[in-house]
Amino acid sequence: MEIKEYILPGSFALDSDEELQQPVIAYSTYGQLSEERDNVILVCHALTANSQVHDWWAGLFGEGNIFDPTRYFIICINNMGSPYGSVSPKSIDPETGNAYRNDFPFYTLRDTARLHQALLTHLGIDRIKLLIGGSCGGNIAQEIAYNLADRLEQMVLLCCSAQETPWVIAIHESQRIALHSDPTFSSDEEGAGAEGLRGARAFALPFYRSHPSFKIRQSEDDDSVMNDFKASSYVRYQGDKFVKRYDSVCYYHQLNALDTHHIGRDRGGIQAALSQIPAKTLCIGFDTDLLIPVVEQQILADGIPDAVYHQIETAFGHDAFLIEIDEIQSAIRQNINI
């Protein structure tokens, strides 16, 4: 599936009072937009994913599933700061002709949501039938939902929160320390900061999973093992794998942006902001989620007027939103008209 690009004309103002010139927005679409333009599903992806939703949420994709391209026009937009196509530290600054790298301006998750909406405007889309996002994508979806108001019909939020919590910010700061510990991180060379990126990813991995999932998949078969444990090898493998596909400076800026998430900032607080989202909403939590515990999804469900909370029992922690596909699809079918 080809990734499309749209170059936003002129400048794009950021919450930091800086600007991006002619930012690129990368996105993928599936299916056909109806004549009434009323069959749009907008998918907001997680922190390190991309716009190719058919790859990372394959179980929800295809005829007869939630993301059915024979019925709906499905859009997934690559997040600002990502190395997968949208404007990021890897992008060329049109004013200098060089990659931004460490000179990329500070931006917020609201900036990412507004850039998503700029693409929707370009595509002539004013109404959304279903908006869905998990983890970071759920935070972005909240911002879009607040802005769209009654132009959004339905929403599904998975394992996300109304505000980035001190717990998650502390995890992100530990990752930033790991990134800065790499002496090459401040270099503008391609591939700089690889060791720091490996460490940052490895540090966060247990928070994405759970105690039960590690016991299930990483326990030793031989009681005599005293080093080179399966769990150790697994964490190293995931760190190596991440370095091959991601960029350290992009990751750093994305962590910073994620920490800015606060649906109630300058809107009278969380409850006041959530009360302004009229969309029929399903909030899904996972009982073993260490990163964003279910209490955070319950806050969302309590605050959004037409929302329900659904909990899925799982051994796989936060990443269950990419694993427990049958349970997710069933919950959506029961609560959302799709």
Image (spheres, rainbow, N blue to C red):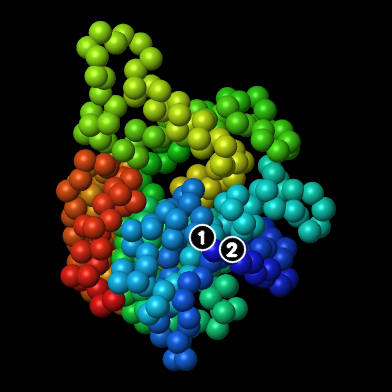
**Position of 220 relative to 125 (above/below):** above
User: Considering only order in the chain, which callout, 1 or 2, is on the residue closer to the N terminus?
Assistant: 2
The residue at 18%/60% (across/down) is 310
Q: Is residue 293 visible?
A: yes
| Residue holding disc 1 | 51
Residue drawn at x 71%, y 33% is: 187
Q: Using residue 224 as the reference point, say whether residue 151 is left or right of it.
A: right
Count residues near mark 1 (Cα–Cα under 10 Å), then give few for <14, some for 14-19, many for 20+.
Answer: many
Q: Quadrant of the N terminus?
A: bottom right
For the C terminus, the quadrant is bottom left
**Nearer to me, 107 or 42:** 42
| Mark 2: amino acid | Ile
The image shows residue 297 at horizontal and vertical percentages of 26, 56
Q: Secondary structure at mark 1?
A: loop
Tell me where residue 193 appears, x and y as whole percent.
62, 31
At mark 2, the secondary structure is loop
In terms of depth relative to the viewer, which is nearer, 23 or 302? Answer: 23
Name the image quarter holding residue 34.
bottom left
In this rendering, the answer to whether 177 lies above or below 331 is: above
Q: Which residue is mark 2?
A: 3
In-front residue for pair 160/235: 235
Left or right for 311, reference 235? left
